[in-house]
Image: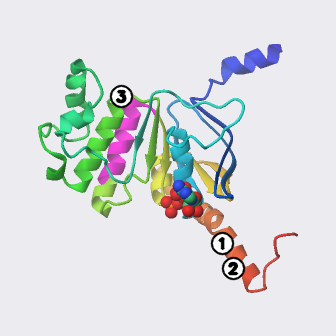
């Protein structure tokens, strides 16, 4: 009992706690009992092969899927913002109105400041169609951040951008997440993006999280290069091994599912 209280005092409560999250689509179990805690301000990247259920998990956390079931001690903060691959700005609203949509009039100043923070100062009155894809994603990020979320959910937000814009968005996301310090769950296909941005990388496989790896990049250049290369190899192996094994089984060379 005493030990329990002492432990709790030392380890802060996570802002996100997922227990036994399950989701089935017409008999197909996509999420089969996902468990994940995310600490305040922690940046977690979620990797997984196509169709592994990453978007399904994110939608469940965003409260967009009423049929996803968790169990027991399960919570997500009320102040949660979401960004997607497309910016989803409303075409009939100017940029600032998009950013502060649903907020009080007195929040316009904060909306302006947040637009400036993402590099869109002076563009408050622009229409969404006047912006490039990268600028639209900046605006989507501003709309997410102006609400000071405790949790930012991001579903491949840079997937549709060209390489240079993507790199700039990485810098921006890192900068703003240092300032606003939300917990972040970033769904990505890009191993390098995950290593560059995240404190922790988790992999979704067969409906459960199969890996949970702390990134911990050293500051010293050479040590950092070595660590990045190791992580990349490890993550690639983790992502590819089930597919490789399945293929071996199919051609009659594998160990099979039993042993
Ligand atoms: N609304 C739905 N109805 C039926 N099946 C669905 C639905 N949404 C997702 N699925 C199925 O659930 C599985 C996981 O889909 P999901 O989009 O979560 O995967 P993902 O890991 O995000 O994939 P990708 O990396 O390709 O975006 C897929 O097999 C998909 O066909």
User: In which image quadrant can residue 85 be found?
Assistant: bottom left
Residue 137 spot, x, y in % from top left = 29, 48
In this view, the residue farthest toward the bottom is 251
Is ligand 1 closer than 8 angstroms to the Cβ of mark 1?
no
Q: What is the spatial separation of the Cα atoms under label 2 and label 1, in whole angstroms?
A: 6 Å
Left-right relation of 238 to 195: right
Residue furthest right in the image: 259
- Judge by depth and name the residue closer to the eye, 1 or 61: 61
The residue nearer to you, when weighing 220 against 76, is: 76
Taking the image as drawn, is residue 106 in sight?
yes
Does the CB distance between marks 2 and 1 fall below 8 Å? yes
Q: Where is residue 52 in the image (x, y as percent from the top left)?
A: 60, 60
Which quadrant, please, contains the C terminus?
Answer: bottom right
Extent of the magenta region: 168-182
Looking at the picture, tell me which residue is in the foreground, 201 or 72.
72
Q: Which residue is drawn at 42% across and 41% down?
A: 82
Which residue is disc 1 drawn over?
A: 243
């Amino acid at each position: 009992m005493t030990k329990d209280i002492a432990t709790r005092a030392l380890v802060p409560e996570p802002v996100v706690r997922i227990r036994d999250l399950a989701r089935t689509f017409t008999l197909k179990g996509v999420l089969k009992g996902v468990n994940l805690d995310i600490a305040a301000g922690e940046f977690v990247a979620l990797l997984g092969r196509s169709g592994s259920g990453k978007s399904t998990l994110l939608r469940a956390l965003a409260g967009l899927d009423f049929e996803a079931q968790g169990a027991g001690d399960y919570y997500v903060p009320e102040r949660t913002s979401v960004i997607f691959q497309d910016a989803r700005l409303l075409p009939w609203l100017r940029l600032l109105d998009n950013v502060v949509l649903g907020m009080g009039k007195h929040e316009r100043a904060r909306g302006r400041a947040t637009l400036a923070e993402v590099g869109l100062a002076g563009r408050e009155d622009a229409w969404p169609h006047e912006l490039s894809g990268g600028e639209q994603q900046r605006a989507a990020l501003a709309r997410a951040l102006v609400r000071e979320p405790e949790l930012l959910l991001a579903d491949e937000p840079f997937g549709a951008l060209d390489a240079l814009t993507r790199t700039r968005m990485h810098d921006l996301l890192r900068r703003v997440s240092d300032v606003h310090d939300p917990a972040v769950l970033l769904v990505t296909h890009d191993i390098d993006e995950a290593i560059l941005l995240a404190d922790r990388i988790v992999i979704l496989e067969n409906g459960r999280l199969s890996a949970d790896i702390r990134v911990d990049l050293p500051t010293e250049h050479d040590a950092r290069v070595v660590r990045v290369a190791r992580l990349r190899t490890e993550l690639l192996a983790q992502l590819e091994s089930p597919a490789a094994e399945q293929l071996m089984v199919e051609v009659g060379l594998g160990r099979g599912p039993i042993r």
